[in-house]
Amino acid sequence: MEDINEHEIDGLIQTMKETGIKGLMKYTDVLVWNHICERNWCNESNREGQIKFLKQETDMEYNEIMNLLNRYDEWRKYLPSYSLRLNQNLDSINKKINSVIPFKYIGNSPNKRLIGFVDEGNDINIYDGIGKHLMKLGSVDKKSWSINWGTHSVLQQEHSSYITSSVRELKNRNWL
C-alpha cells in the first residue's frame, strides 16, 4: 500500500467541496479515481489496463470496478482536468517533501537560493526551488558520490560550498 501525501489529499478535498454534500456522497469514488488518473498514478489509458490496476491496487470486486469505470466515463466531461501547472506544482511539492536533505535558503538577496537534495533512483538530484518551478542544479551519482553540475545556472561560492559539504555529509551517512 502506497502512502499518499497530505498535499495530494488537500487538492482532492477542494474538488469535493466544489461538488457539495450531495455530489460528495454520491461520487466520492469517481472523484478519487479522477484524481488518480489526473496525477498519472494509473498511467493506463485503456480500460483493460485500468481494470488490471484497480484489481492489483484495491480490494474491489470486478463488478465494483466496472461500476466505477462506467460512472467515471459518464462524469468525466464534468470533472476537473488538472492543468500542467497544477501537476507540476504537486510534483514540486512532492519532491520538496521527499527530499533527503530538506530545502534550505542559502545566501542573501539577490543571490539567495532554496537548495534541496532529492533521491531519484540512481542519482540524488540537486534543485533550486526559489522560483515557480524546481530548477535542477546538478546531480550526485550515488555510486561514486561525484557531482555532475548543471550547465544552466551560475552558482555563487556559498552555494557550491553548501552543496559539496552536503554531498560529503550524504556520503558519510550512507557509507557508515
Image (cartoon, rainbow, N blue to C red):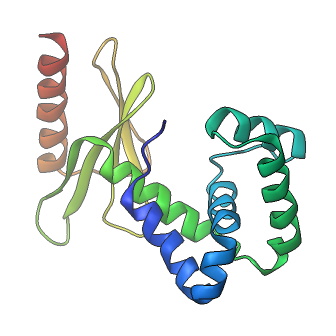
Residue 166 located left or right of residue 113: left
| Residue 124 as seen in the image, left or right of residue 114 | right
Q: Position of residue 94 (x, y in %)?
A: 41, 53
Q: Tally the numbered discs.
A: 0
Q: Residue at x 39, y 49 (%)?
A: 95
* Relative height, residue 163 to residue 108 (above, below): above
Q: Residue at x 71, y 41 (%)?
A: 54
The answer to whether 144 is drawn above or below residue 93 in the figure is: above
On the image, which quarter does residue 21 sit in? bottom right
Above or below for 26 versus 135: below
Q: Position of residue 114 (x, y in %)?
A: 24, 58
Horizontal relation, residue 149 to residue 77: left or right: left
Q: Residue at x 88, y 46 (%)?
A: 47
Residue 48 picture quarter: top right
On the image, the x and y values in percent for residue 33 come to 68, 59
Q: Front-most of 61 and 147?
A: 61
The one nearer the camera, 165 or 85, is 85
Quadrant for the C terminus in the image: top left
Q: Quadrant of residue 93?
A: bottom left
Q: Is residue 156 above or below residue 132?
A: above
